[in-house]
Image: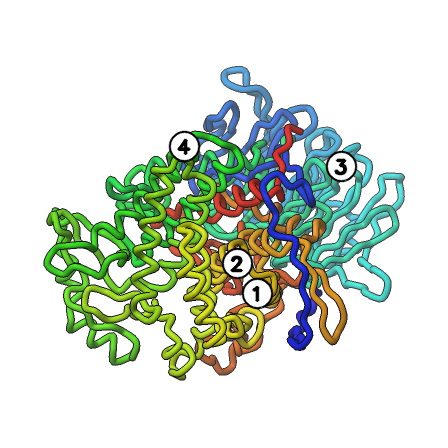
Amino acid sequence: MKSFVTVGLVMASVCITTSGYAQQGSDEAAIAVGKFGQEVRTFYTTAEGLPSDEVNAVAVGADGTVYAATAKGLAGFSNGNWSVLVPDTAVYLVTTDPRGGVHFLEDGGLSGISGVGPSMGRKHTPLHGSIADAASVRCIAVPRGALFLGADSGFYVTSDVGAMNASNELDDLLGADKSIRDFATTADGKSFAVAAAAGVFANDGTGADWKAVNPRQQEKCWNSCDARGVAYDEKSRLWVAMPQGVACLDGETWELFTGHDGLPYGDFTSVATGPAGVVWFGTHMGAVRYDGTRWVYRQGLRWLPDDDVRDVAVGPDGSAWFATKKGVGVIRFEPMTLAQKAKFYEDEIDARHRRTPYEYVLEVSLERPGDKSKWTQHDSDNDGLWTGMYGASECFAYGATKDPKAKERAKKAFEALHFLGEVTQGGSNPAPKGFVARSILPTSGPDPNEQATPERDRRNQERDKKWKVIVPRWPKSADGQWYWKTDTSSDELDGHYFFYGLYYDLVAETEEEKTRVREHVRALTDNMVDHDFCLVDHDGLPTRWAVYSPKALNGDPSWNVERGLNSLSILAYLATAEHITGDPKYRQAADLLINEHHYAQNLLVAKIHNGIGSGNQSDDEMAFMSYYNLLKYEKSLELRGQYAFSLYRYWYLEEPEANAFFNFVYASVVSGQQFSNAFGSYRLGRDSSGPIVRSVEELKRFSLDRLNWGHDNSRRIDLVHLPKYSEIEAYAGERSRKAFRVDGYVIPVDERFFNHYNHDPWSLRVGGNGQSLADGTVFLLPYYMGLYHGFIKESTE
């Protein structure tokens, strides 16, 4: 398990040499990424042809045909369609044999079918008299033509004449509880294993007797009682699912896996092996996959029709099929490149996520959970921030690929943000020049002021002293066509400036385009410089959070938490404005804040926290955008060294989150820099075997499904819970509801949901009911940033 140690570095005698930030085209530490298996899930119910949603078992034949045993019949899936093979009967189990036959358990006994349509043949074998009923049978298999059956009453084998006999040899080993849970055989049909209430028993097929096996790895030894499942993989390794964890027997050597080894969950129901040594485990709370190096957890409607997986089967192509009480689920692996993935998200955005003629990009609401055919667009408090981050991704895209579509999308984002500055000018409540609105709504719709009343503001002010009462909260534009939202926040401005720098550098190619950026950035920055470094609204007062004045940050204790972050932000704004406009007054303003009000020292502690997983996660998103611009545009080597050191300390805190955007910001602006202090010399740079590799892996793992399905990771057994310092409130008698995995990193992106980078990745219960569809900016921004800075290199292999 990775350990986290708070880094305390003596600031005296810090010396940093700077070599600049990584430019486009750098091959240092580039990760070549070709096609990979993108996981995509599909659900099947009666609507797609199943006789019942109550699915008890699944099996896959050698030809890839899938069979589902349901409460109302047996169904087969081939060529993309389900067909009912045996209707109007409860089917409990199903299996296939090497010759293409299908065998299933129904109330009357065991049946076998071969062929399809009118030529289909059917054979029936009654259950042994000691078997209470079909529901008490747990497994069936046909390894060598003979049919094996495991039930609560023991293990049975059919004879050549079709009679079913108890296996007395194994029966003697089972003891009082003779329940058989699972049966497995090697590919050649020579070796067998069973999972039983009494333990795990194996037979090597050489004529020797059955023998009990108890997994043991060095000093760790497990009693195999209450074994849940067994399976042999293509290398004839035996996999066993047990209450203690997973055991693998390779020849004579056992390897044991528990939560300490990365196993996510362990209340097993079934086991199935597939190509390339992959093993799938069904559990009562999702499904687990192991590929020999990595454990993956699939839980919730993003991946499964229901969490209680009754059975799992793996096809020849590696697809995993799941039987649940709410239908059949399948996870397929579709060949895809990161570029194709980016195109998928961009097409989704173009189809649904562009609000108003100015095309603000953010999530949409769905009429029904999971159904993307009908959606409703809405505004948010942060239309400028989200559109700015989306626009930034398209700036990187154009910088890396010169794709005209990327330039068009980036220009649309600029026009959207530019209008947030235009719409506030004039009308009955004009704002000072340069003020940018949070959002806009058409006046043809409901009046938002009917909800956003002064009375509501005063109620909010009772619980939050910084809450601002402003009337109206939604003024009308000069042309009467738009309501615009006031009280623009600091996080909005961080998104604006992050985008403006990239747009100016990478997209605005003509003098006319650059002039429009200069004028807009100048007006916005002057609004703050002229008002003691505060963004002033139509009421002549600073907004609630866009306060950067020395009087507040250095003189008012209520701003202590924001001191470092807001110092970072305003210095980034001024550096960006100086770069874009060329006006030295912004350098002079920054020097004033640095030399007379120690803002450079303020930002050395940009986040107030108690350790990993604590503090405001939204601040992290804001900080990394500001660090990028500040380190890119600051001309003083000495100041850049201080800022790089600040970013290093901040990034060290965030590194366990494996956030690709944060990692790429860090790598792009501190690459090659060194510092020394009382403890020695350090290099602040890229590690091709660490954060960059991990970031690329996260990008590959992003689900194509951006619905806000819920994820409940609270029952995982591979977690290290954070101390209570990470909770907003203390919950007596409860463990922290935040955790990281035993490998030292938070839960991966495909095992949780987040809409934006202000999400808390340490939380164990996230998401919703699938009625909100997020856009793909959280993938597009780091992907195109990594491509532009040379961290990612597309490969054709």
Q: How far separated are the C-alphas under marks 1 and 4?
A: 63 Å
Residues under labels 2 and 1: Cα distance? 7 Å
Dot 1: element: helix
Residue at the spot of label 4:
48
| CA–CA distance in space, label 2 to label 4 | 60 Å
**Looking at the image, is mark 2 or mark 4 nearer the viewer?**
2
Could you tell me which secondary element the residue under label 4 belongs to? helix
In the structure shown, which secondary structural element does the residue marked by tag 3 occupy? loop
Looking at the picture, tell me which residue is in the foreground, 586 or 212. Answer: 586
- Residue at the disc numbered 3: 234
Q: What type is the residue that disc 1 sits on?
A: Leu
Label pair 2/1, CB-CB below 8 angstroms: yes
Question: Mark 3: few, some, or many residues within 10 Å (few <14, many ≥20)?
Answer: some
- Residue beneath disc 2: 634
Residue for badge 1: 639
With 206 as the anchor, is 576 left or right in this view? Answer: left
Can residue 601 be seen? yes
The residue sitting at 39% across, 40% down in the picture is 410
Image point (24%, 43%), residue name? 356
* Foreground disc of the pair 3, 2: 2
The location of residue 771, given as percent across then percent down, is 34, 49
Q: Earlier in the sequence, mark 2 or mark 4?
A: 4
Q: Residue furthest top?
A: 119
Say left or right for 68 vs 35: left
